[in-house]
Image (cartoon, helix red, strand yellow):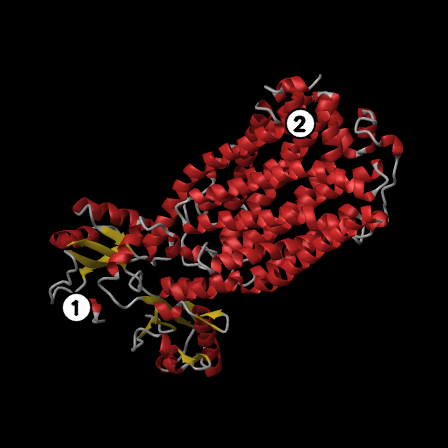
Amino acid sequence: MKTTLWRPLAIIAVLVAWLAIGGIGGPLVGQLSEVQTNDSAAFLPSSAESTEAAAAYEEFSSSDTFPGILVFDEIDDFAAVQEFVGSLGELDIVDGVTVGDLLANDELTVIPSDAGDSAVAIVQLDAEKASERYEESSVPELFSVAVNEAWEASGNAGEVYVTGAVGFAADLVAAFAGIDGILLLVALIVVFVILIIVYRSPVLPIFVLLTSVFALGGAVLVVYNLAANGMLTLNGQAQGIMFILVVGATTDYALLLVARYREELIRHESAYQAMWVAWRRSLEPIGASAGTVILGLLTLLLSDLASNQSLGPVAAIGIAAAFLAALTMLPALLLVGGRRSRFIYWPRKPKFYPEQAELTSQSLEELEAQSGVWGRVSRAVGTRPRLVGSIALLVLVVLAAFLPTLQANGTGQDEVLLGEQDSTTGLAILEEDFDLGGSTEPVVIIADEASADDVVAAVQEVEGISAAYVLNEAILAGAPPEAVAGALPPTVIDGSVAINAVSDYQPTTEDGIEQTSAIREAVHAVDETALVGGSAAESYDVNVTSERDLRVIIPSALAVIFVVLILLLRALVAPAVVIAANLVSFAATLGLSAIFFNWVFDFPGADPAVPLFGFIFLVALGVDYSIFLMSRAREECVARGTRPGVRVALAVTGGVITSAGIVLAATFSALAVLPLLFLAQIAFIVSVGVLIDTFVVRTVLVPAAITDLGRISWWPWHKKISD
């Protein structure tokens, strides 16, 4: 009695520990938005030119503003619009706080369009006050809601749209609000449906889903406290990706463990013994898989963007939580019935067959016959490896040929959001009916006093620049630049002056962002020490930094993953084959994505971080399936030889690895429910890439290559394999 009492006590202890973790971390899911930072300027390194320009400009202007634009469309009474705008200061956003408390400009001017059926008003919120939260909501979001509700209540004809920095911030907050609601719900429902189909059991899917939910609670508990204490930067994209990774990875690890446990229940009468063997034999591939993904994600720490740097540890924490939950909580749940734990697989409970106790007790032919379709696939790959491998490689190479057509040079801020949004609709009306250009957010230039006139002249020569002027005391106090520019001496601080350049383009558009390069080229030709900043320059620097990250992080991630594979497979050739196959798969995925992005979805382009994130997720996660296959293949190859060993591994793992791939692809596709271009593209790339890895790379290309190479695949430790 005493020898077996520790087992149920250990199970209870594990479940109680996870209940405590979930009880603390679960409620924090809805509070993660409180510790998010979604300002792109905060992600840039201090060495970025726009960051240095912003720091220098603070010396000239003590007022830090956050601009917004109210666009009124299809109006029939301009005076009513003026009256509405004039009363904005009295509008409550929450109890005790009015719009007037947030405004940095006292007088709001309304500008009619030439046709008279639309108008705009420019508001400047105090940046510090705009960053505060009231009743768990951001100021831009509250401002936008208050303006829309007040306009609707006024009974005036037409519509009002909040755009500019305030409007885009409000719409981004609204988009990210779906992360801890609809995104998580969709992901869990998708996983549950797939698990029902895979297991055909009412109990197992619930246990796997519970494990995923509690793993997420554990990850959130750690991430929330690190972000709240300033130890990492969390943004909405990182949060959404973490949610998906935790659910998908936990389910993948659970599928592998459950499948191996089922095998061992056939070989062992005791459920405890079966679990111990399954756990021990699953630990290495699951550990290697988790370790590969974690180390791959941590290479994002090499990024110069704080947003990328934060995603690395945030997502790595999620994978670690998934690993721990899958190897502790799930086994405890599977053994909760003690000696009667086979009931969990009901109605298809595995029976104990003593004659199958040894790993090699069944012949290759018997195993392939029992494995159904995967046995037939195994036989086809094993008997004609060079032919089927060449066909698979040809398909991937053809898709990869479209990779150069992928447009990943950045997009305008107005293209970040998908669907109908107030900020993008308002901006479209603004560009069509008005000629404000970038006057609401001018380009900021810090130059040497001696070269000020030359810099102004150089900037004015740049195509798309309508005006440029040196700031003086009157302009800094709020006087119209066109009235006082040049009338007073410039404001000089430490030998430098500040210059504003007005562009014909809105800084949120792709044209406005790309113009930064031409402005810098013109300015630096006159004054090498000059700094060009502003919101368009910040977006430009984000794109440039992302391109640099792509060149640095991809080789680093490949090196890390290669080392992990060497340690796991105890070989050099097989890991090289796996890495090469996954690189071809990644290129094919981006080629296929380019086809859909350009000609099916008609996307405006992609952020340079899209291929980087796609690479990190696809290569790290795609290698997972090769790890699951090849770790089992090595186990079988030692006992049977390379060619039969690979065939057995493919036959017995085909079902579970395919299920894992489908689950992960479906889980990542849930990211597309959020109206964000970046996440929609990541969802497509990872989902399609995982399916390619599952059905082409792991099923055909890798096993065909290893089979064709034979024993040399395990070089230089190939002598342990007896072919």
Residue at 66 percent across and 50 percent down: it is: 325
Residue 477 shows in the view: yes
Whether residue 42 is situated above or below residue 3 in the rendered picture:
below
User: Label 2: how many residues lie within 10 Å, few (<14), some (14-19) or many (20+)?
Assistant: many
Q: What residue type is labelled 2?
A: Pro
Q: Residue 225's spot in the image, x, y percent?
A: 51, 59
For mark 1, give the secondary structure. helix
- Mark 2 sits on what residue? 703
| Quarter of the C terminus within the rendering | top right
x, y (%) of residue 15? 71, 55
Q: Mark 1 points at which residue?
A: 473
Residue in view at x 15 percent, y 63 percent: 491
Q: Mark 1, residues whose alpha carbon is within 10 Å: few (<14), some, or many (≥20)?
A: some
Q: Position of residue 62 (x, y in %)?
A: 25, 67
- Find the distance from the CA under tag 2 to the CA under tag 1: 73 Å
Can you tell which quarter of the image residue 588 is in? top right
Across and down, in percent, residue 368 comes to: 80, 29
What number of labels is visible?
2
Of mark 2 and mark 1, the one earlier in the sequence is: 1
Q: Which residue is drawn at 36% across and 62% down?
A: 431
Is there CB contact under 8 Å for labels 2 and 1?
no
Q: Which of 677 and 223 is in front in this view?
A: 223
Q: What element carries label 2?
A: helix
Judged left or right of residue 36, residue 525 is left
Name which residue lies at 61% across and 26% down.
570
Q: Say if 282 sits above or below 336 in the image.
A: above
Q: Is residue 397 visible?
A: no
